[in-house]
Amino acid sequence: MTTEEKKGTLYLCATPIGNLEDMTYRAVRMLGEVDLIAAEDTRHTRQLLTHFDIHTKLTSYHEHNKFTKGPELIEYLQQGHDLVCVSDAGLPGICDPGSHLAELAIAAGIRVSPLPGCNAGLSALICSGLDTTLFTFVGFLPKTAKKQQETLARVKGYEGTLIFYEAPHHLKATLKQLEVGLGNRRAVLGRELTKKFEEFRRGSLQELLAYYQENDPRGEYVILVEGASEESCPVEEDTLPKDPVRLCQQLMADGLDKKSAMRETAKKLGLSRRDVYQALLAEDAE
């Protein structure tokens, strides 16, 4: 038997995003067969295991301990044990440290295998009525408005549907940032997916923001925004300022930091970044 054959397998196991009946037969079986489950929140996962009468040992693996716990779990796998990794809900590796563990396992020559199931982003997408042939997952926006606008500037021209996640206490601020960064596009908000109070609300970003100004957001949200089009991104390249200083200032006013604005200015005007930098220096010297 080779060393490779002696190594265990890392299973990335989807868990319900609300309704426990969405758990697959295979996932329930595997959670009961392995000797150890790495969980984002052991208390949360213990409730799931109790529901299915599973008594497998749990160990904590989350964003704050992944750099110390990850290598320990890899050593456990290298000893020939199988390991199941779960997040609190949905697919591990999507907006949680499961992706880091998968990277470590692959680098160590350990087999990584999915136990497919629920995913909030795709579940909302197929019910949205927006384009499902081309889409991209953005997830949670960065914490600061500046970084949020930098992220939105990068995806503004993307033609497919954009998928975001958001918590209720940040929803209104995020809708405002989306409108500023992307324009007043069509959007769909899905909340409490698969649960008793599941809801999809559709409208423009302005309409949705107005609604939640009057109604407090409740539950976890998936935000889906239509992709770029001539209507949603009406500014053509030939309407942009040709002067690098003016264009750079405009991009910074739109939310980009100075370095990013200089890079975009150079790209749009066909200049080198050094040329843009020299133009800004000359402007500051006047």
Image (tube, rainbow, N blue to C red):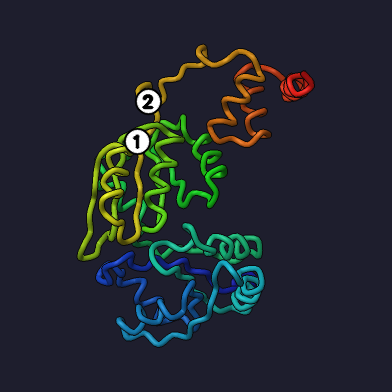
User: What is the number of callouts on the image?
Assistant: 2
- Which residue appears at 31% of the width and 81% of the height? 52
Image quarter of residue 166: bottom left
**Residue 229: mark:** 2
Residue 138 lies, in percent from the top left, at: 46, 46
Q: Is residue 6 visible?
A: no
> Looking at this view, is 90 or 37 the one in front?
90
Disc 2 marks which amino acid?
Answer: Ser
Q: Quadrant of the N terminus?
A: bottom right
- Which residue appears at 52% of the width and 34% of the height? 153
> Looking at this view, is 266 or 125 the one in front?
266
Badge 1 density bin: few <14, some 14–19, many ≥20, Cα 10 Å: many
Disc 1 marks which amino acid?
Answer: Glu
Query: SS for tag 1?
Result: loop
Residue 128 lies, in percent from the top left, at: 26, 44
Q: Is residue 255 above or below residue 247?
A: below
**Residue 40: mark:** none
> Looking at this view, is 169 or 36 the one in front?
169
Image quarter of residue 22: bottom left
Labelled pair 1, 2 in contact (Cβ < 8 Å): yes
Tell me the residue that label 1 is attached to: 226
- Which residue appears at 46% of the width and 35% of the height? 181
Query: SS for tag 2?
Result: loop
Residue 115 lies, in percent from the top left, at: 40, 65
Q: Is residue 83 visible?
A: yes
